[in-house]
Image (cartoon, grey):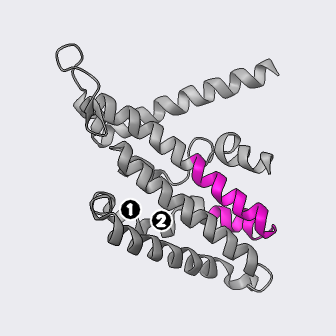
């Protein structure tokens, strides 16, 4: 279980290693609150989808397995979408179309096909959860940097004084997400290569 957790969060991180699910990563990482909301939604959908796919893996014919996975994923996305709309309407309004787009998030479909389809229930649940957490950590780090440098505040609390350090407006915009993600990827790869060379 430790290996599965480490794989999903660090060594096979869905965003930093697999480079999947980037549409939502780049789109909603303007604030930490949006990133947390999206991350929790992905964790819930990935975990529950892996659970159901693992339970049904012996009953789903190979010829129609992908459409079946999409139906399972879409069901959980619909539930998450309705819950968010009912209980967190402000966050729901911010995330907009990105919640329904979880259905076609490569991360969730890849884990259903690549892991849950071949493994028992508990490891599949751990795998879905770990990959969701790996996704969430990455998007939150990206959002933290973008919100801090782009607006000078986190959760509405001003951290960078306008007199000393002025916010960099472009970081909060779409091109900024590519720049910051590229920087995070470079740092992550540097640390990974350094660890491998030391071992």
Q: Main secondary structure of the magenta part?
A: helix
Q: Does 192 sit above or below residue 45?
A: above
- Residue 179's image quarter? top left
Residue 24 is one of the magenta-drawn residues? no
Image quadrant holding the C terminus, namely top right
Which residue corresponds to the image point at 62% horizontal and 71% vertical from the top-left? Answer: 49
Which residue corresponds to the image point at 38% horizontal and 62% vertical from the top-left? Answer: 98
Horizontal side of residue 182 vs 172, given as left or right: right
Horizontal side of residue 97 vs 122, given as left or right: left
Q: Does 174 sit above or below residue 91?
A: above
Residue wearing tag 2: 102
* Tally of marks: 2
Would you call the spot at circle 1 few (<14 residues within 10 Å), some (14-19), or many (20 or more)? some
Looking at the rendered structure, the secondary structure element under dot 1 is helix
Q: Does 15 sit above or below residue 43?
A: above
Which residue corresponds to the image point at 47% horizontal and 65% vertical from the top-left? Answer: 102
Q: Percent from the top left, x then y, of residue 174?
A: 31, 43
Q: Percent from the top left, x then y, of residue 132?
A: 58, 54
Say which of 191 and 44 sits in front.
44
Which residue corresponds to the image point at 62% horizontal and 69% vertical from the top-left? Answer: 48
Residue wearing tag 1: 98
Q: Are marks 1 and 2 in contact (CB under 8 Å)?
A: yes
Farthest left residue?
163
- Residue 52's image quarter? bottom right
Q: Range of the magenta residues?
A: 110-134
The Cα–Cα distance between marks 1 and 2, rounded to whole angstroms, is: 7 Å
Farthest top residue?
164
Would you call the spot at circle 2 few (<14 residues within 10 Å), some (14-19), or many (20 or more)? many
């Amino acid at each position: 279980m430790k290996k599965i957790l480490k794989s999903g969060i660090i060594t096979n991180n869905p965003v930093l290693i697999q480079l999947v699910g980037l549409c939502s990563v780049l789109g909603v990482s303007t604030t930490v609150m949006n990133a947390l909301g999206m991350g929790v939604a992905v964790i819930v959908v990935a975990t529950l989808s892996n659970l159901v796919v693992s339970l049904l893996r012996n009953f789903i014919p190979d010829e129609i397995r992908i459409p079946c996975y999409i139906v399972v994923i879409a069901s959980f996305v619909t539930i998450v979408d309705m819950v968010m709309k009912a209980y967190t309407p402000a966050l729901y309004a911010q995330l907009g179309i990105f919640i329904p787009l979880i259905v076609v998030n490569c991360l969730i479909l890849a884990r259903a096909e690549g892991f849950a389809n071949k493994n028992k229930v508990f490891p599949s649940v751990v795998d879905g959860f770990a990959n969701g957490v790996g996704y969430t950590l990455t998007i939150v780090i990206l959002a933290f940097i973008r919100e801090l440098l782009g607006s000078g505040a986190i959760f509405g609390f001003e951290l960078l004084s306008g007199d000393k350090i002025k916010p960099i407006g472009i970081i909060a915009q779409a091109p900024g997400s590519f720049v910051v993600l590229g920087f995070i990827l470079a740092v992550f790869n540097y640390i990974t290569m350094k660890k491998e060379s030391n071992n």
